[in-house]
Amino acid sequence: EPEVTQTPSHQVTQMGQEVILRCVPISNHLYFYWYRQILGQKVEFLVSFYNNEISEKSEIFDDQFSVERPDGSNFTLKIRSTKLEDSAMYFCASRIDTNEQYFGPGTRLTVT
Amino acid sequence: AQKITQTQPGMFVQEKEAVTLDCTYDTSDQSYGLFWYKQPSSGEMIFLIYQGSYDEQNATEGRYSLNFQKARKSANLVISASQLGDSAMYFCAMREAGSNYKLTFGKGTLLTVNP
């Protein structure tokens, strides 16, 4: 069964460093999303992406964040200068044109 | 105001019994969707079930069913014949109209299935 994949599973970085989180959505899906979940809290929407552009972003998604679909398969989230409060689980999700969003296994980002 | 409210931080159920996890929502849209996801201790988010606001029948997927009461704005998840592997965090989420299908999540309910 097709699934969303994410790499790495765990990323440790120092404050101020840039990180890129990678996702490979399900191949025929058209809509892509990033969410984050701070430890012990609920999942929060960051950004949605369709037709090679951002369709919506939350107030969390400030100038430090960017997304890109550099080729036909990858979907990346970049954080330019990480802060301690960026430590969280980051989920990529995708959907075709139906309602169900399928989530990847997540990348746990730890900023020290 | 919270858009998704899950009032049960934790629930316990005996193996093989049924359990209901509560979810209420708040929206002024006529078209919306409600979802339940399971998050085991390993961290991944597993889609369980979906209910559209115009669906007349309650959604069912195997041992999962969604008790949708539109007038009360509730979308409770019912798990029948609980298994030890059902122990996990359960999140209710909503998609509103014109929202690019982004999901708004509740705070979750931690379900523990006892043998």
Image (cartoon, helix red, strand yellow):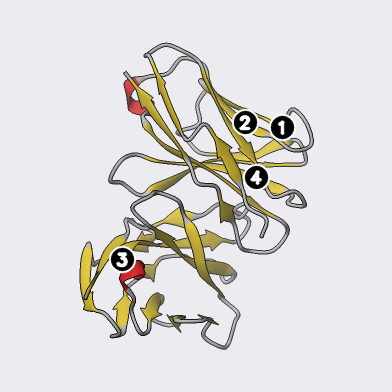
Given the image, what chain letter belongs to the residue carrying mark 1? A
Q: Are marks 1 and 4 in contact (CB under 8 Å)?
A: yes
> Which of the numbered marks, if any, corresponds to residue B74?
none
Marks 1/4: CA–CA distance = 10 Å
Q: Quadrant of the C terminus of chain B?
A: bottom left
Q: Are marks 2 and 1 in contact (CB under 8 Å)?
A: yes
Of labels 2 and 4, earlier in sequence is: 4
Above or below residue A104? Residue B110 is below
Decide: few, some or many residues near mark 3? Use Cα within 10 Å; few <14, some 14-19, many ≥20: many
Q: Which mark is residue A69?
A: 1
User: Which circle marks residue A32 in the picture?
Assistant: 4
Q: Nearer the viewer, residue A93 or B94?
A: A93
Q: Is residue B62 left or right of residue A33?
A: left
Instruction: Tell me residue A37's x, y (percent).
Output: 39, 42
Query: Mark 3 against mark 4, which lies toward the viewer?
Result: 3
Label 2 neighbour load within 10 Å: few <14, some 14-19, many 20+? some
- Residue B17 position within the rendered picture, expressed as x and y whole percent measured from the top left: 28, 85
Q: Amino acid at mark 2?
A: Thr
The three-letter code of the residue at mark 3 reads: Ser
Q: Which residue is mark 2?
A: A76
User: Nearest the camera: A43 or B19?
Assistant: B19
The verdict on a common chain for dots 1 and 4 is yes
Give the residue type that dot 4 points to.
Answer: Phe
